[in-house]
């Protein structure tokens, strides 16, 4: 359910004109200053052109760029939803439980396991049509990121915000994620409930994870697991401002090597009436998941969505033309009443 839509998103690229024009303006000013110094001294130049303003060209450029930016937005043509209606949809309820523990920072799979997990979930969402989705983040505990919804845009926004610092409790408790997921499926009539656990397989909850999976299965939830990482493993980098400062070490001072535990993930999927999926190849994993979801029966449910949208380009067009019109009447020379105030001590006392 999107309140705002954009007709021609391609025109957003035209906003790249703004930084290019700013750069050209700065280069032009540097070139002018250099040539002026070759011609005469700054003091003499002020006498020859006493009304030349330093700030006016900057103001003119700012006004012009604002006008151009609004014209680009007019080309994009934003639309605002004006009418909500209830529509019938068919789909499956899907919950993604994403591991955000520190081990997900290992870079045995580019750029790291967490970014790979987020990309996998994002690509799966791109393949969905009318399924409802929810997102859970978990480490030493589980935290609901997004309840069951059909708003894929919001799902991607929350997904991209996930990081290894969002939960204070470290460790990896898969059982907490499964227990929390069972509370997400609030539609008793939904016969197909799917849970995807995206993780490197590290689990500090012991046998309670299998108990949680069994309970989820009893409630009609199929648990699939997606493994991210490599069995050979990799160290966990500790970074500051994107630069590796050190590697995570254990109590004995040895570098910790975090490995993908496919055995644990496969066991969880088996107990949860699901399948283990190797997430190293994104395209293959997404295609396989799409096939599995297509084979499931879809339940019909009602959802709210905007059915009518109203063009808003005229507002941006009007504002853009106003600023361009204003730019025409802004001159490079000083405004007389401001000149009298002498705010910047521009008067030559000599």
Image (spheres, grey):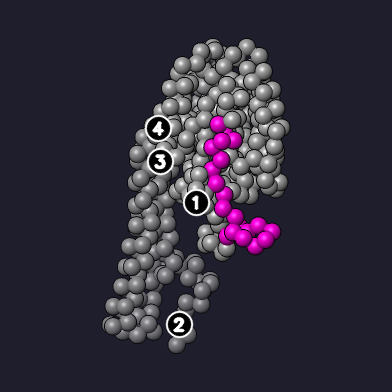
Question: Seen in the image, is 3 located left or right of residue 57?
Answer: right
Q: Is residue 278 visible?
A: yes
Dot in front, 4 or 3: 4
Q: The magenta stretch spans which residues?
A: 247-266
Residue, disc 3 = 73
Helix, strand or loop for disc 2: loop
Q: What residue appears at the point 39 percent right and 72 percent down from the top-left corner?
A: 51
Helix, strand or loop for disc 1: loop
Q: What residue appears at the point 52 percent right and 26 percent down from the top-left corner?
A: 275
Give how far across and how far down residue 338 sits, in percent: 50, 67
* Pointer 3 or 1: first along the chain: 3
Is residue 199 positioned above or below 350 on the image?
A: above
Dot in front, 4 or 2: 4
Give 312 or 196, whichever is nearer the viewer.
196
> Which of the image's four quarters has the C terminus?
bottom left
Count residues near mark 1 (Cα–Cα under 10 Å), then give few for <14, some for 14-19, many for 20+. Answer: many
Dot in front, 3 or 1: 1
Residue, disc 2 = 348
* Pointer 4 or 2: first along the chain: 4
Q: Is residue 263 magenta?
A: yes
Spatial separation of the CA atoms under disc 3 and disc 2: 44 Å
Count residues near mark 3 (Cα–Cα under 10 Å), then give few for <14, some for 14-19, many for 20+. Answer: many
Question: Seen in the image, is 310 located left or right of residue 248?
Answer: left
Whether label 4 touches label 1, CB < 8 Å = no
Whether label 3 touches label 1, CB < 8 Å = no
Whether label 3 touches label 2, CB < 8 Å = no
Residue, disc 4 = 284
Q: Is residue 261 magenta?
A: yes
Residue, disc 1 = 107
Is residue 132 positioned above or below 58 on the image?
A: above
């Amino acid at each position: 359910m999107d309140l705002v839509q954009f007709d021609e998103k391609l025109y957003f690229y035209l906003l790249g004109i703004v930084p290019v024009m700013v750069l050209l303006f700065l280069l032009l000013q540097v070139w002018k200053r250099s040539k002026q110094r070759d011609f005469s001294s700054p003091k003499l130049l002020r006498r020859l052109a006493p009304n030349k303003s330093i700030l006016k060209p900057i103001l003119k450029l700012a006004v012009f760029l604002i006008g151009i930016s609004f014209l680009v937005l007019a080309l994009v043509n934003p639309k605002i939803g004006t009418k909500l209606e209830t529509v019938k949809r068919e789909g499956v309820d899907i919950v993604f439980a994403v591991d955000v523990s520190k081990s997900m920072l290992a870079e045995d799979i580019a750029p790291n396991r967490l970014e790979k997990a987020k990309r996998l979930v994002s690509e799966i969402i791109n393949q969905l049509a009318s399924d409802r989705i929810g997102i859970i983040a978990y480490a030493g505990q589980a935290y609901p990121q997004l309840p069951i919804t059909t708003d894929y845009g919001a799902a991607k926004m929350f997904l991209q915000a996930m990081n290894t610092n969002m939960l204070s409790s470290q460790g990896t408790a898969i059982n907490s994620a499964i227990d929390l997921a069972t509370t997400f499926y609030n539609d008793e009539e939904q016969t197909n409930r799917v849970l995807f656990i995206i993780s490197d397989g590290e689990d500090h909850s012991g046998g309670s994870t299998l108990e949680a999976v069994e309970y989820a299965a009893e409630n009609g939830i199929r648990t699939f697991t997606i493994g991210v990482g490599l069995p050979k493993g990799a160290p966990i980098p500790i970074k500051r401002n994107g630069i590796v400062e050190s590697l995570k070490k254990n109590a004995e001072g040895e570098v910790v090597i975090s490995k993908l535990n496919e055995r644990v993930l496969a066991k969880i999927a088996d107990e949860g009436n699901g399948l283990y999926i190797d997430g190293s190849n994104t395209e293959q994993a997404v295609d396989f998941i799409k096939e599995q979801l297509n084979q499931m029966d879809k339940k019909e449910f009602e959802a709210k969505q905007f059915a009518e949208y109203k063009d808003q380009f005229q507002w941006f067009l009007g504002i853009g033309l106003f600023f361009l019109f204003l730019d025409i009447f802004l001159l490079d020379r000083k405004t007389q009443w401001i000149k009298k105030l002498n705010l910047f001590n521009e008067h030559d006392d000599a």
